[in-house]
Image: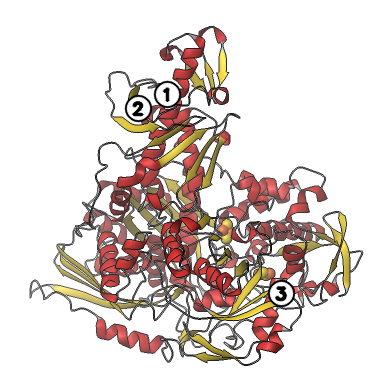
Amino acid sequence: MGERTIVGTDAGPGTSGISRRRFVGYLIAGPTLVAGAQLGTTAAAKAAIPTVQPVDLYDLSDLLTDATRPTANLITITVNADGTVSFAMPRAEVGQGITTAAAMTIAEEMDVPVSKVRVTLADARPELVWNQITGGSNTMHAIFTPIRTAAAIARGALLEAAADQLGVSTGELTIRDGVISAPGGRTIPIGSLSEAAAVSADVTVRAQLKPRSAFTVVGKPQRRVDALDIVTGRKKFALDAAVANAKPTMVCRPPTINGSARAVRNLAQVQAMPGITDVAIIPHSKHVPGGVAVRGETFGQCIDAVRALSVDWAPGPAAGKSDATVLADLARAELPMTPPVNLLAKTIDKRFTFHFRPGDPLETNTAVANVRPDRAEIWSSLKTPIWAQEQLALDLGLPVTSVKVHVTEGGGSFGRHLFADAAFEAAAISKKLGKPVRLLWHRADSFRQGRVHPMTTSRVRATYLGDNVLAFDQRNTAVATDWGHGFGELLSALGSTTPVTNLGYSQLVFGLTANVPYDFGIVSQLLNEVYDPTVFNTSSVRNVYSPDVTTPRELLIDQLARAMGKDAYQFRRSFLRDARMRAVLDKVAQAGNWGRAMPAGTAQGIGVHREYKGFCAVLVEIDCRPATVSRAIPNAFTGPRVTKAVCAVDVGLPINPLGLEAQMMGGIMDGIGQALTYSLHLKDGSFLEHSWDAAFYTRQWNTPGDLQVIVMPPTTDDPGGAGEFSVAPSMAATACAYARATGTLPTTFPINHGRANLGFTPAPTVPPVPASPTDGLSKAY
Amino acid sequence: MPQFSFILNGGRVTVDCPGDLRMLWVLNDLLGVRGPKYGCGVGVCQACTCHVNGKAFNACSVPVSQIKPTDRITTIEGLAASVGKPLHPVQQAWLDHDVAQCGYCQPGQIMAATAKIRQIKAQGRSVTDADLDEIRNVCRCGTYPRIRKAIKQAASQM
Ligand code: FES
Ligand code: FES
């Protein structure tokens, strides 16, 4: 392989004399210009999962980034003849804005307009091994530098080709808006150089990246690249895949979680229903939820058929379990606290319960599958497409190369698409029927059989003497989180298929994310889990363990501050370890006017959280006065209202402040819901909730009228994660505000979970989905 | 099979299907109009919101037999053309405020917001926070605050 060095990038003002690191990448042989990149100096493969270390040294972002290092060199950028630059990103876009952030990064490094960069989602590429998992809000942290390196190499190659054509040196050329200019006003658009800059054999290239001081795109607000497609209804999701004869398909699901169909009593009758083409039992397995599949001309007819089916069901492993029985199992599994450190010291010791919460995105589980005897093709929103592809190949008995897995854009994920439930199920149905299928989960299925945030209890104890906190203990006990996707490919997924190893994964992630950002002496945080992960359908739902770690801690801190006679903000301030954390706390205290006089029944609350290489603080104001709590919105669950939220976030290097604001905003809506209203009630092995008017996710009537998100100026040269950062601190702040406003420490979350009146009428579990209404016109407005 | 006919985004369409088939499936599955989204199928999430003669309705909750041949159905795909512009002011406001995240709920949000603004204007009022509080559309990504801002902007321009 040849070698060259590209020094080309314009260093910008004020950077002369700074010697900058060179990053290694490739020019890849082909008819047009393709540049690829690897991370600079740390390409050595890590053979094993690193030992758990304190989060200060090593957190989940590091782990996921390290996991990508061996293969990051395979990220490529192509310059097309029409002047566009394309990048097939080996990640899932599910609303978090990474396609926009990636387009900005490429535009920045190459000096092309963002509108000329086309970011698509790569199909499953097994050769990427660990480099195609979207999780832990880690995407930009992991791929920022590889993308920049490839872009810088492409830019350099374009400059060299232009210099050749124009007979000048590259140093005399500039690129702006995708056009190269030479002295004397001669210009060449980059598209016309895409062939000339191509190489006939791979070349290793060393390139310098732009210094942060020269950035004009990264760090500036940028609207989403797919916004126009979205507002015109053109954006494509999985079900929009154009696959001939992939007819609507739904599944009649069991009345208990993970039950299975033994027999269909009225098969002939349902098969004869209008529009129905197929009815078949799909066995429940570890990867395929299953039930009785129906395929037909329209989803409406599938719903009717699902409702008409009479099925003999075998109960699932959760049969007989209810909120109370799971809580009792959790209580038995709670790990002991550390022995007292000082007999003179006082303690505050509290227990909290966090109920099951849905992991539902707005788009339910969907996939299109076309399984043939010798090949299979799948379309779905997948955060672990390599694992999906390898597992599908095993399940279908096909070589991996005969299974094509297309990653479609997702209508949200919240952890659900780390698994490939819809893809596996659609493939199983397509194989069984020998026909292509377009699988849609009903919303009722999604709440009742979809993956959830596991029920968790948390015991927290602070030991203090005088003005010092001597020790802080936290014991979280939870229904097992399923890590069956491993690190997104088959080997590590197999590693997590035994309960012991699954707990190993849980411990690993808990250890890498749980932390106490305060100087509280001896800190001990431990997790224990109950049940095999196949009993309930769980996953690392948005922000994973953090909401249930952060909320108890921040509530306890308020108690501790009061016991010491200190202001809750000043107390946090004085114990926080990190200056960046203090800075975001100060920011929200100041912008949110902490401590202002408020009427009885209303109050402020504050919460902080550190994760994803960054720091986040949220201040909220809540109104718990009776007139507000019982405000009348037709058919709505109202309750206490968060009237104001102020969030400050330090992600290191913010790529797109507008996108970050959006992510923080979404996380706050989530945190408010998790604190106040959003949960599932488990009864007799099934969840009662079946609709969004039963599982009370935040709606407009719960939305704070006053929301402010402050993105802190860059504190490092690398972007941290952002996708879910504000969930935990906003949940904690809401809980703290509620405690202050009502004078009662909430110990069960969401706060409305235990009330006598559910606020909805549970729908039956047989049939599993409700009838489609017919009264829509009477409600038209 | 019975035939049903109506005006869809300015052009007449005719479908052969059972009369109880809900409009969402007529649009998505039979006519290939995929902007209206499925989010619940029970008239709750509002992701399927379209217009009938300018009024918002849940396509998942209306059998096609209830739609008359003279009814004008507008989906997100036909919204801009219904005002004879490249973008409806509500769509433009959505762009201006960069409202969307995953975008799955947004066709329904935009159709609902458009009808809501019209309804309020017809009452000779301007949009209040209480009006915004009553919007039922679910956005799991939590874009609610930007939706509120965009609606206020669009209302001032419609
Ligand atoms: S799909 Fe029609 S209201 Fe939810
Ligand atoms: S933008 Fe994702 S559900 Fe609204």
Examine the rendering and report whether any part of residue A106 can be seen.
Answer: yes
Percent position of residue A463, x then y: 16, 70
Residue position marked by numbered label 3 in the rendering: A300
Chain bearing mark 3: A
| Front-most of residues A357 and A349 | A357
Q: Are marks 1 and 2 in contact (CB under 8 Å)?
A: yes
Percent position of residue A117, x then y: 54, 36
| Front-most of residues A609 and A166 | A166
Residue position marked by numbered label 1 in the rendering: A156
Percent position of residue A136, x then y: 37, 57
Residue position marked by numbered label 2 in the rendering: A207
Q: Earlier in the sequence, mark 3 or mark 1?
A: 1
Q: Earlier in the sequence, mark 2 or mark 3?
A: 2
Would you identify the image quadrant in which residue A776 lies?
bottom right
Q: Is residue A29 above or below residue A445?
A: above
Pick out the residue farthest to the left.
A343
- Give the amino acid at mark 2: Ala
For the residue labelled by badge 1, is the local secondary structure a helix, a strand or a loop? Answer: helix
Q: Is residue A293 above or below residue A60?
A: below
Pick out the residue farthest to the top.
A184
Chain bearing mark 2: A
